[in-house]
Amino acid sequence: MFGIRVLIYLLGIGLVVWILFRLAKAPRVEKKPAKKVDEMVRCARCGMFVPRHDAISEGDRYYCCSQHRDEDR
Ligand SMILES: [Zn+2]
């Protein structure tokens, strides 16, 4: 009887520790990059400034549209 109670007790502790361990590890909050500020890049063709995520990159150059990219080839 005593052995079983100790065993259950230890299992309970083990479970709590396991849950705590999981809770501590589980919420892996994927930190979104704080760099959300749009960098403005200049079209190598017409010189217009466009947000980097809207620009079309070609090597180390950026273009405002695919047409300008093609024209500048
Ligand atoms: Zn352009």
Image (cartoon, rainbow, N blue to C red):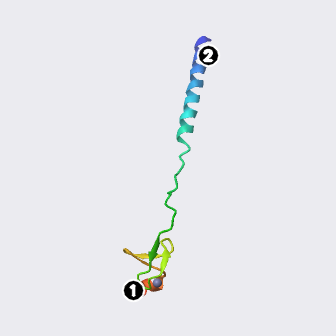
In the picture as drawn, the residue positioned furthest to the bottom comes out as: 71
Mark 1 CB in 8 Å range of ligand 1? Answer: no
Q: Which residue is mark 1?
A: 72
Circle 1 — which element?
loop
**From the viewer's perspective, is residue 73 above or below residue 3?**
below
**Residue 26 image offset from top left, x and y in percent:** 55, 42
Sequence-wise, the earlier of marks 2 and 1 is 2
Picture residue at 56% right of the left edge, 21% below the top = 10
The residue wearing badge 2 is 5
User: Number of numbered discs present?
Assistant: 2
Q: Is residue 24 above or below residue 60?
A: above
Give the mark toward the camera: 2 or 1: 1
What percent of the width, then of the height, locates residue 12?
A: 60, 25
Q: Residue furthest top?
A: 2
The quadrant in which residue 57 appears is bottom left
Q: Is residue 37 above or below residue 50?
A: above
Crowdedness near tag 1: few (<14), some (14–19) or many (≥20) residues, C-alpha within 10 Å: few
The label shown at residue 7 is none
- Distance between mark 2 and mark 1 Cα atoms: 79 Å
Q: Which amino acid, mark 2?
A: Arg
Quadrant location of the C terminus in the rendered image = bottom left
* Residue at x 51%, y 74% (from the top left corner): 54
Q: Residue at x 45, y 74 (%)?
A: 41
Comparing 4 with 24, the one in front is: 24
Which one is nearer the viewer's eye here, 37 or 69? 37
Badge 2 element: helix
Residue under the point 54% across and 48% down: 29
Residue nearest the viewer, comparing 47 with 54: 47
Question: Which quadrant does the N terminus fall into?
Answer: top right
